[in-house]
Image (spheres, grey):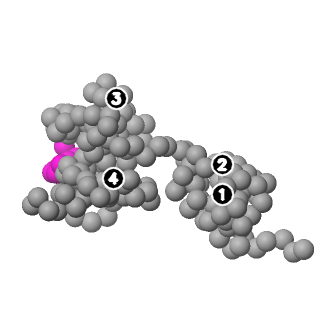
Amino acid sequence: MPKATREQITNDEKKILWELQKNSKENVEKIAKRCGFSRQKIWRAIKRLEKDKTIWGYHAVVDDNKIGLQQYFVLIKRTNKAFSKEHIDSIVKREVESEIAKMGIIIENVSYVHGEFDGINIIRASNVIQVKKYCEILNELSKGYISDMIILEELFPIEKNGIINPNIEELKDIFLTE
C-alpha cells in the first residue's frame, strides 16, 4: 500500500484537530470512529501535533457566570512610536502576566492584529473595575506605546471555541426584553 501523501496527512490531521477542538477530553476511540481512522493513527497524529506545537495545549470551555467572572475584550491602539528592544522583550517574556494574576484576572487570548486596532486582549474578570485596573497596568508598562484602549463587555456568549452555549435559549429573553 502506498504511503500517504503530505496533503493527505495534512487533511487527516485537520479532521483530528477539528474533533479535538470540539471536545479535547473525548477519548481516542470515539475520535477515531468519527474520523474513520484507527486508534493508533489518531494517537500518533496527536503526539506528532503536540511535539511540533501545532497543539499548544488543552482547556475547558467554562460558563463564566457560574464562577463569578465576566468576559471582556480590550481593543488596543498603539502609537507610531517604534518599540524598543526592552519593550519587545517584556511582551515576549509576558512580564505583565504575574501582575495581572495577582488581581484575579484570567487572560484568555492576546492577539496582535491588523486593522483599526493593533491588539485584542480577551480577559475574564469579576467586574469592569478590575478591567480598568488591568488597562492602567498595561498603560504603565507600555511607556507611551498605547494611544487608545476600548473595553467591551460580553453580554451573552453564543459560541465559544466552536461549542454552542448550552443555555442558548436564554438569548431569546435578551432580545425580547430590549
User: Is residue 67 in sight in this rendering?
Assistant: yes
Q: Indicate which disc, 2 or 4, sits on the residue closer to the N terminus.
A: 2
The residue sitting at 30% across, 29% down in the picture is: 104
Q: Indicate which disc, 1 or 3, sits on the residue closer to the N terminus.
A: 1
Kind of residue indicated by mark 4: Asn
Q: Which residue is mark 1?
A: 31
Q: Is residue 20 left or right of residue 31?
A: left
Circles 1 and 2, Cβ within 8 Å, touching? The answer is yes
Q: Which residue is mark 3?
A: 101
Q: Which mark is residue 27?
A: 2
Number of numbered tags placed on the structure image: 4
Q: Indicate which disc, 1 or 4, sits on the residue closer to the N terminus.
A: 1
Which x, y percent locates residue 98? 36, 28
Q: Nearer the viewer, residue 111 or 38?
A: 38
Q: Indicate which disc, 3 or 4, sits on the residue closer to the N terminus.
A: 3
Kind of residue indicated by mark 1: Ile
Q: Indicate which disc, 2 or 3, sits on the residue closer to the N terminus.
A: 2
Q: Which residues are magenta?
A: 144-151
Q: Secondary structure at mark 2?
A: loop
Q: Nearer the viewer, residue 161 or 65?
A: 65
Q: CA distance from mark 2 to mark 3?
A: 32 Å
The residue sitting at 16% across, 39% down in the picture is: 128
Q: Which residue is mark 4?
A: 167
